[in-house]
Image (tube, coloured by chain):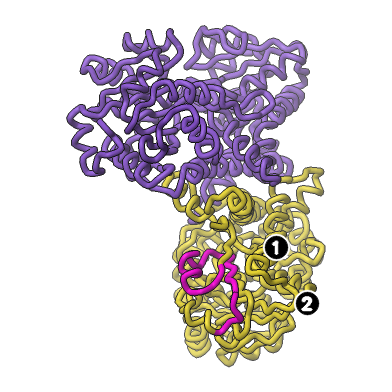
Chain colours: A yellow, B purple
Amino acid sequence: MDFLSLKETEIADKLKDGKIKVCVIGIGRIGLPTALVFAQAGAKVIGADISEEVVENINKGITYIDETGIEEILKDSISSGNFIASTDVPSAINEADAIIICVPTPVDNNKNPNYSDLMAVCRDLVKGLKKGSLVIVESTIAPGIVEEIIAPFIEEKTNLVLGKDLGIVSCPERADPGKIFECLKTIPRIVGGINENSSNIAAALYKAAMGVKVVKVSNPRTANAVKLTENIFRDVNIALINELAILFEKIGINIIETIDAATTKWNFIPHYPGPGVGGPCLPANPYYLIQVANRVGYIPYLVRLAREINDRMPDNIVNLIFEALNGIGKPIKGSKIVVLGISYKSGVKDVQYAPAERIINALKKYDTEIACYDPLFENEIVFGMLTELSVEDAIQNADALVFCTAHAEFKQLNLENLSKCVRQPAVIVDTRNIFDSNEVTNAGFAYRGLGVPIS
Amino acid sequence: MDFLSLKETEIADKLKDGKIKVCVIGIGRIGLPTALVFAQAGAKVIGADISEEVVENINKGITYIDETGIEEILKDSISSGNFIASTDVPSAINEADAIIICVPTPVDNNKNPNYSDLMAVCRDLVKGLKKGSLVIVESTIAPGIVEEIIAPFIEEKTNLVLGKDLGIVSCPERADPGKIFECLKTIPRIVGGINENSSNIAAALYKAAMGVKVVKVSNPRTANAVKLTENIFRDVNIALINELAILFEKIGINIIETIDAATTKWNFIPHYPGPGVGGPCLPANPYYLIQVANRVGYIPYLVRLAREINDRMPDNIVNLIFEALNGIGKPIKGSKIVVLGISYKSGVKDVQYAPAERIINALKKYDTEIACYDPLFENEIVFGMLTELSVEDAIQNADALVFCTAHAEFKQLNLENLSKCVRQPAVIVDTRNIFDSNEVTNAGFAYRGLGVPIS
């Protein structure tokens, strides 16, 4: 089938009838749910990944991705014959009408964007691509990567005429980990193609498969700019609140009380302070834009500063731990500090760029005993440590309990019971404003909270 | 009446029955509408101001404030006997149960907060205040000004026992110029008092007079922090979009298209680029917080940088004018440049910190001929220039038309007709994204827009 020659109106029916073949490359946190939504909508989907272990497990119906209901949907899709995983990426590409790229685009230790997975996919694309197919880049990338790198690379290495024989669009994923299926089916998609037909076909496909509104923008780079703008908006606003949290604590103002009150104004939206910003997107995305800006001789000072502020938050938390222990007359040296919550986000099993790692590594330098517990990582090796089996196990003889993730489980804790397990006096350091300070002190702990003045 | 001894539940009835006397000090853009809303709700209101001209005009029913319907409400309130203006501030204070302070708190040329009007009010307060009254500070001030300056000053200079004989609260105004009456009656108020009774009485009073929800916070400084946080949030987000606008223009991306697409994500809210941020609040408020922060040895880098980015936008616009004229082969020297829109905000007659002033002053250095037109400032002396009577008058023989305010009138302009009045080739520089670029070029102008790439 020459997919690009279909009429837009034909696509929904063809999809439902199992006539559209989709290849999703990179079946991780975004790619697998995306592949499964296409499979559920009727597409014949191959999930392609270079990891033999991932492919083998997924074909058995097993995945480490902790989105609600994913294993059931996976098993259904396998048994219906609409989904299979494969390590043979070029063959998967060759069979597909639409090739959806969902590989990660992280930054390296020097904060430089690392597009190596994406370039590996490009090398497979030129081996496998056939005439009439559509390449869809969902990975978050800098504006210009499609137009200046991916498209010229394919054009040079194949005899496909771009726009005519081959469509290319950017359609950045906009889903939030922890509720990806919900996001895929509700949040409008942004599509920017190298030509109008690419955009139209991609828009019709997503509309049919996901049931969402699709916004067509002028070109791939604009679609990429939209995604980066959204995430940079969040990063900047979290940085602002982190900056204010630290200031307000010093001048006797509670940041949470302030945010809650400000939120009653129609044009203010709340962001909350925390020990740092983790996850696959926010700690990396701004650097994609910074790199592109630097190439045209422009320094986006605000984007860069916001990133730096959030990147330094773990150090501020270490300082807060120092102060908290000092408040109960203890040094960090020789104390037992328990980190509660190592995921970067509540309810999500993911430690990518998690601030807990930075905090733990910083504490290790101070000759302290560290334990950590996370309900999503019980008895696992994380950050080179074995996580504890329960909060109670973790906090035996602890001097400081540092809450780094606002997991729902933590809000249910009986602090009074916990205060009997620790080495009193002990302090709770709440970096996520999980607890009310009175609740903590009434339970027999000293209290320090991020953005909460010492009362 | 000992106003502070009233039960909260009595206040609405007393207000309706004309038993509550209110003094509003500073009857400008916020103070006058506030005074009138209290008068309409039944209070006996004295509007106190040191300007004899303002007081005299207002008592005749005349005001320069251009809020919809204000003169009618003013005349009604005067004839009902519920409102009168006076220059005798101490007497007005002495008669009142509640004294509401609405004087401006600008920054000086060195960006230092200037609280001189507020301190003048404090000197009048200690002359006039009587036992049982409530002082309400609506002016935007730094956290701590009430607790560390106003309250101790009153306590020292009077024999009133704070909290018992005298209540003090901060209840920062949150109204947007252009729709102040609407805001006063819909946006919740934030009240933070020096003690609980002050907060309760003030909350009951605003609830009764304005019909709005009132959020009580711990103390005056928190109420002030809420107001600053709201406005700094806006300033930072506008700065981010201004930074991105300049970058995106360089890398071939339209900022408005990007913002519109990003707005389809639930947790993104749009802010728009512009020639700078004017008005009484945003260009000043961040400095109140910066000053307080500096006193405790903390530099709020992000707040400061955002303010600097917005403060430099007029220079970016001058550069855009250079490029725009260069694009049609003309230098600034000897060209006629017409600034269209001098108000800082569309539909509002106010040039406080208006970016148009900075742009005009910068252009003057380049030996150019400048004219300006604003539908709200026809034939007036503004920035040392006489404004024109019409767009057509202004643009005779012009080389560049620079739109600095998105007045609704400008959106209705017939650009084709305008293109016949100018000295062709001529260029439209659109700093507010009022026009579509094709519309402008089809009408016979060259086009440059802020955040719009050269096509």
Q: Is residue A217 visible?
A: yes
Q: Check contact, mark 1 vs mark 2: CB within 8 A.
A: no
Rendered residue at 45%/14% (across/down):
B50
Q: Earlier in the sequence, mark 1 or mark 2?
A: 1
* x, y percent for residue A393: 58, 88
Residue A253 in the magenta stretch? The answer is no
Q: Nearer the viewer, residue B335 or B83?
A: B83
- The answer to whether residue A433 is magenta is yes
Q: Position of residue B396 (x, y in %)?
A: 60, 9
Image coords of residue A112 (percent x, y): 79, 61
Relative side of B418 to B90, left or right: right
Q: Which residue shows up at 49% across the image and 72% down it?
A: A181
- Give the CA separation, mark 1 to mark 2: 15 Å
| Local crowd size for mark 1, using a 10 Å CA cut-off: few (<14), some (14–19), many (≥20) | some
Q: Is residue A191 above or below residue A396?
A: above
Helix, strand or loop at mark 1: helix
Give the structural element (helix, strand or loop) at label 2: loop
- Residue where numbered disc 2 is placed: A367
Instruction: Answer with left or right where residue A81 lies relative to residue B22.
Output: right
Query: In the rendered view of the protein, which quadrant contains the C terminus of chain B?
Result: top right
Give the percent coordinates (x, y) of residue A318: 70, 66
Question: What's the amino acid at mark 1?
Answer: Asn
Q: Chain of mark 1?
A: A
Q: Residue at x 59, y 31 (%)?
A: B284
Q: Which residues are magenta?
A: A421-446
What subunit carries mark 2? A
